[in-house]
Image (spheres, rainbow, N blue to C red):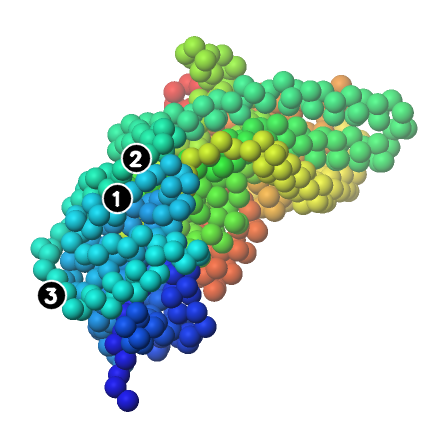
Amino acid sequence: MPELRSAALVGNPNAGKSALFNALTGARQKIANYPGVTVERKAGRLILPTGETIELTDLPGSYGLDATSPDEEVTRKVVLGELPGEPAPQVLVVVLDASNLEQHLVFAQEVIALGRPTVVALNMVDLAERDGLVLDPAALESALGVPVIPTVAVRRRGLPELAAAIAAAEERSAERPHPHTTLTERRVSAQAIAEAAILSETAQHRLHARLDQFLLHPWIGPLVLFGLLFVVFQAVFTGATPFADALEGGIAAVADQVRASVPQGMVRDFVTEGVLSGVGSVVVFLPQIVILFFFILAMEASGYMARAAFLMDRLMARVGLSGRSFIPLLSSFACAIPGIMATRSIADPRDRLTTILIAPLMTCSARLPVYAVIIAAFIPNRAVLPGVGLQGLVLFGLYVVGIVGAMVVALVLRSSVTKGAASGFIMELPKYQLPRAKDLLLGLWQRAWIFLRRAGTIIFTVTVVLWLLLNFPRAGEGQNQVDASIAGKLANGLAVVVEPIGFNRDIALSLIPAMAAREVAVASLATSYAVAAEDEEQAALALGEQLRTKWSLPTALAFLAWFVFAPQCMSTIAVARRETNGWKWPLFMLLYLFSLAYIFAGITYWSAVALGL
């Protein structure tokens, strides 16, 4: 029996190859793995108009022949005939997404340049027309030099014409070999070919294209991104202050009511000093959390977040990473745990390990209560420019320091323990769209609930344990309760270590329970000062007022510097252990992050003292 001729579908992910493969082969398919790898091989029988049957293979989606993942490696080897036991297909069928033509033409040019019999399937033309884009296949065919067949796989449109083109592909004269071009040259050429192939486009499509020209501009784009982030952090302070003050006032009123109605004793102290002062001091930052996530969710829903990843790719490349690391790192602004788990999408193991190791440096939402309480207590609430508050500027600076620190650490790691070549990065950009109010509200509710649930579980539990450790054994006559307590004695031991960087015993005490969750540091400080208060009037003071009377400005700045770097979250360490399959890298992460925290807190404190702050 003569061996069947063969053809293969190649193209970018999400070009509609699988739908086209299913439409062309129907149930005549075989699915197995390629030898030695877990990449799925899908092959089927295609009956040509001549009655001849050929084997059609659906290759894994790829962005180029320079493979960056196991899937792309298989595609490259099959196309070039380098995979053992897998002859090179006689005909290559390049599948293009008509609505994302420019992006898909980059790889298409590379395949056509091989000089092999090639046919282009211009797929999903119905979706492109729905979005207001009408293309000219003849112009595309003229530019590429190979047959271009418009198709709609799910509606079986264009399939007979495509099958006929595949049948005739080898009968045409040998394709003229194309000169080798670089990726940059193919991108420039793809833009010109795509623009020439457009017959008409709607005003909306034109607007989106112009938005991309502006927002993805190599110089203007980053300025817009950082300007937007600056506005976010200004809004976190200015917009949340009235709501946070109202919450703080409400909690204080409840505490006064408890003091007035419950007899003096351990039960009343537990409710006022443990629950209301401890947990309440964290809950008041709910408005800041909601405002921060409003902007994050809006950027995701509008399609801007993917473009931010595209912009950051250039910066990432300078420190040895790719734009693939941006989404996990961006997720780490909410929490490092989902950020570390999101690194599974990074194919390069060194890229992935580096991203895991620097993820805790992204300023997660748990740090926000710590930053907010210190900034509100020590940084004057005044404008430095019209519409620009000093407090918001300091908060923005802390986020920037975390980002810069992460990039510097990534550069050092990629030059040493995770040394290796940087991988490439190509991603699909979603369409712009207005965020739906219902989706935003649902997302905000979920984030608010997660924050409140942490306050009611982890923070409440740790605060109760801390209150018990602060109240037992009971102090004797004329003795300070914190000095006499178990927690006070433990903190005295740690205070010896942190005193050189300006930390007092109260701060040392807050660092221990904060290992459970960073925001517990705020609850710990509030509980400690409430227990140590000499009278109820002093105990009723807000945490910010307590801090102003007990801390110096250099100490407060050093405390902020500590929390920029310190890995104060055991859950993050546990997830890092699971994702790296051992304790080696989590312990490395703990060591370098605590070292950075100690060094930079010390530098901040010593510098501030030297400057007379």
What is the quadrant of the N terminus in the image?
bottom left
Query: Is the C-beta separation of discs 3 and 1 under 8 Å?
Result: no
Query: Is the C-beta separation of discs 2 and 3 under 8 Å?
Result: no
* Residue drawn at point x = 44 percent, y = 19 percent: 613
**What is the x, y in percent for residue 547?**
60, 24
Please, is residue 540 above or below residue 561 in the view?
above
CA distance separating discs 3 and 1: 25 Å
In this view of the protein, which residue sits in the foreground, 530 or 347? 347
Residue at the spot of label 2: 200
Question: In this orientation, does residue 560 appear?
Answer: no
In the picture, the disc for residue 174 is 3
Label whose residue precedes the other's in the sequence (3 or 1): 1
Label whose residue precedes the other's in the sequence (2 or 3): 3
CA distance separating discs 1 and 2: 9 Å
- In the picture, residue 509 is in which quadrant? top right
**What is the x, y in percent for residue 121?**
30, 56
In the picture, the disc for residue 536 is none
Residue at the spot of label 1: 136
| Residue type, numbered disc 1 | Asp
